[in-house]
Amino acid sequence: MRLTVPLVCTVSHQSAISAAGTGYRLGALREFCNAPSGYALVVNYAPGSMKGAVVAVGEERVVLDGSGRAVISQTPGPRIRDREVFAEPGAAGFDTDRLEFNIEAS
């Protein structure tokens, strides 16, 4: 008998926006990925925006460079987890109306 398990990687956001220090709590992400070699959590945003803004998911923090894409974290194997999302504006504030979180299997 042979069984093939499909690769499934999803991320969902549960919004709950509130002020927190110099930024905002944006709710929580639920990550699910069964890729044996792991995955990357990526944030996409409008190129040219968000320069200098900080996005944190759980303990992982990244300063956005305005490129429109940033890898927040790398996970070495399959995982299911919930993590809080925090954002702190850059010099231009929050100059885009969306952040899109994706999982990319390794």
Image (cartoon, rainbow, N blue to C red):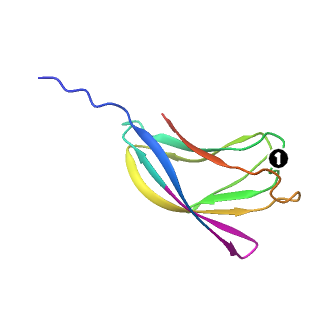
Q: Where is residue 83 in the image (x, y as percent from the top left)?
A: 50, 61
Q: Quadrant of residue 42?
A: top right
Q: Is residue 73 left or right of residue 44?
A: left
Q: In this view, does 74 lie above or below 5?
A: below
Q: Is residue 3 left or right of residue 53?
A: left
Q: In this view, does 73 lie above or below 87?
A: above
Q: Where is residue 23 in the image (x, y as percent from the top left)?
A: 73, 69
What amino acid is at disc 1? Answer: Ser
- Residue ranking furthest to the right: 92
Q: Is residue 95 left or right of residue 24?
A: right
Q: Position of residue 50 (x, y in %)?
A: 80, 51
* Nearest the eye: 62 or 46: 46
Residue at point 56%, 42% (across, down): 102
* Majority secondary structure in the magenta region: strand
Q: In this view, does 2 lie to the left or right of 40?
A: left
Residue at point 37%, 44% (across, down): 78
Residue 45 falls within the magenta-colored stretch: no
Quadrant housing the N terminus: top left
Q: Mark 1 points at which residue?
A: 49
Q: Quadrant of residue 47?
A: top right
Q: Position of residue 41 (x, y in %)?
A: 55, 45
The segment highlighted magenta reads 17-29
- Check disc 1: other Cα within 10 Å, few if <14, some if 14-19, many if 20+: many
- Residue ranking furthest to the bottom: 21
Q: Is residue 2 above or below residue 40?
A: above
Residue 19 falls within the magenta-colored stretch: yes
Residue at point 79%, 50% (across, down): 96
Residue at point 39%, 49% (across, down): 79
